[in-house]
Image (tube, rainbow, N blue to C red):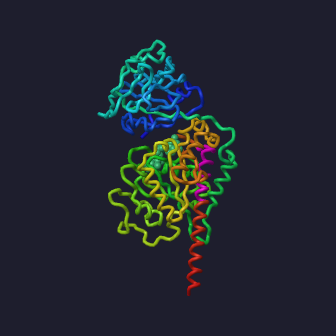
Amino acid sequence: MPELLKKSYRDQLVTWIGKTCHFRLLYKISRDGCSGPTFHQQCDGKGATVTVFYNTKNTIYGGYLSQSWNSSGGYINDPKAFLFRLQYNGSSNPLKFPVSDASKAGYGMGSYGPTFGSGQDIHSFTGQVQCSGKVFSLNGYLHGLGNGYNLNGQNVNTITNNSLSVTDMEVYLVIDGQKQDKPWREHLEWTSETLQELKGTLLDYTPMTETNVPAANILLIGQTGTGKSSFFNSINSIFRGKITSKAVTGRFEHSVTTMYRRYELKDIATKKVLNFRLCDTVGLQEQFAFDSQEFAFILCGNLPDCYQFNPLLPFSPDTPGYIKDPDLKDKIHCVAFVIDGSTMGVMSDPIQKQIKDLQVRVNYRGLPQAVLLTNIDKICPDVDDDVTNTFTSTAVCEAVNKAAEITGLSRDHVFPVKNYESERTLKTPMDILLMEALKQCLDFADEYMDEQLHRVATEKQKHLAKV
Ligand SMILES: Nc1nc2c(ncn2[C@@H]2O[C@H](COP(=O)(O)OP(=O)(O)OP(=O)(O)O)[C@@H](O)[C@H]2O)c(=O)[nH]1
Ligand SMILES: [Mg+2]
């Protein structure tokens, strides 16, 4: 579900907050339900937050607290708090209203939604509010506006358009976006020489001849909308020398990709077909758990290219196209979990569980795993400006740690990337990040194939010893 706060409004809030920072969505009523206890469960004790109301009169307003929300039943003291208006009647119209009674900047009550000010300048809601026709008629009030915040001559009407009927309300965590002096991970130089070197390595890549595997298969799997198909498109673009979008991408409630594709890649300059394939799958969705047997068929190479997933009828040995006796060349050689760095903080329990269940299958087969951490541009404004800031961004470092925690993998198996999405031309730093991540996956795949050879040789020896 998309975040509604657009870039120009984020930039405005950063200016008001007065330090480099970025935002991570903690709570959104259209996604999480409009409930006081849910709001507190997801936001209490987290740190500074921005609450944003999007009302039915195209007006966007809200409040910033540098202190955490709590459910103590008392006021929150915060001299840095402010209320704001970003948009009025559909037009951008930003204004900031500083706190005048800092000792009562916020009010933390377990059954209340976000509440600001003494006499309560903004009291969003109490208890639960149902959505009706995509509108939440919040049961709070705005008539106290001006009691604890300085409105600088404005009033409830010119700030909020007098409406607490909202299409959405979002609470974002404000994360300190200070750049580190020392990179948090050693990285390649951002030069065109590095780019050419990496490209050359991938062009020359070939699995060891003893394996009889012509091309390594890297599986891309993860929640819907995390950028699996975009990762393939990005790598394909690099080798095509221009932005391409062979795989359909986009953000919808259901997975955009509905077919299993083992994409081959070709280098346009040399006309060479590369010796690896990117296998794109349907996205994991909360509503249906990915069929774990179907997943095992993918790993083992039983599923044919272009298989159309059917959630009502999972793949089975009776499905036309079933590959009966797959060998090492048909199998998956490395599993890349694609995780959206900008929404991972609110990854739902059902999705986390599905990832864990799939990991059990992957571990059982001894397959190597990696994480492709996408959307890093959305978690750090410095990276959004320039991808070469990736390894000095505290936000990206934190996201890498969090992805490692979710998947139980070590941090050096998590690779931050920025996929091509709105760019019109190729960018060297983005290409370097993308290719470096892919190269690591291929290294893991090689280790796995090597291990398989070793296993077969050991079994043969054991067998001979017995005879
Ligand atoms: N800003 C940004 N947008 C991205 C990035 N990666 C993907 N996107 C966008 O996110 C949306 C979803 O990307 P897809 O590649 O379709 O995601 P998917 O994982 O294939 O989704 P399903 O096929 O539905 O499972 C698209 O609009 C992409 O343009 C990224 O790194 N940064
Ligand atoms: Mg897709």
Magenta span contains residue 67: no
> Looking at the image, which residue is at 59% across and 68% down?
451
Q: Magenta: predominant secondary structure element?
A: helix
Q: Quadrant of the C terminus?
A: bottom right
Residue 34 place in picture, x, y as percent = 36, 35
In the image, farthest residue toward the left: 132
Magenta span contains residue 435: yes
Residue 124 place in picture, x, y as percent = 38, 27
Q: Eyeballing the image, is 254 above or below 208?
A: above
Q: Which of the pair 4/194 is nearer the observer?
A: 4
Q: Eyeballing the image, is 399 above or below 461?
A: above
> Looking at the image, which residue is at 54% across and 52% down?
371
Count of numbered badges drawn on the protein: 0
> Looking at the image, which residue is at 41% across and 24% down?
59
Residue 377 place in picture, x, y as percent = 55, 40
230 displayed left or right of 210: left
Residue 112 place in picture, x, y as percent = 38, 30
Quadrant for residue 398, please give it: top right
Q: Which of the pair 325/273 is nearer the observer?
A: 325
338 displayed left or right of 32: right
In the image, farthest residue toward the bottom: 467
Q: Is residue 421 visible?
A: no
> Looking at the image, which residue is at 33% across and 27% down?
139
Q: Which of the pair 255/336 is nearer the observer?
A: 336
Q: Eyeballing the image, is 382 above or below 373?
A: above
Q: Eyeballing the image, is 375 above or below 215?
A: above
Magenta residues span 426-442
Q: Quadrant of the N terminus?
A: top left
Q: Is residue 121 visible?
A: yes
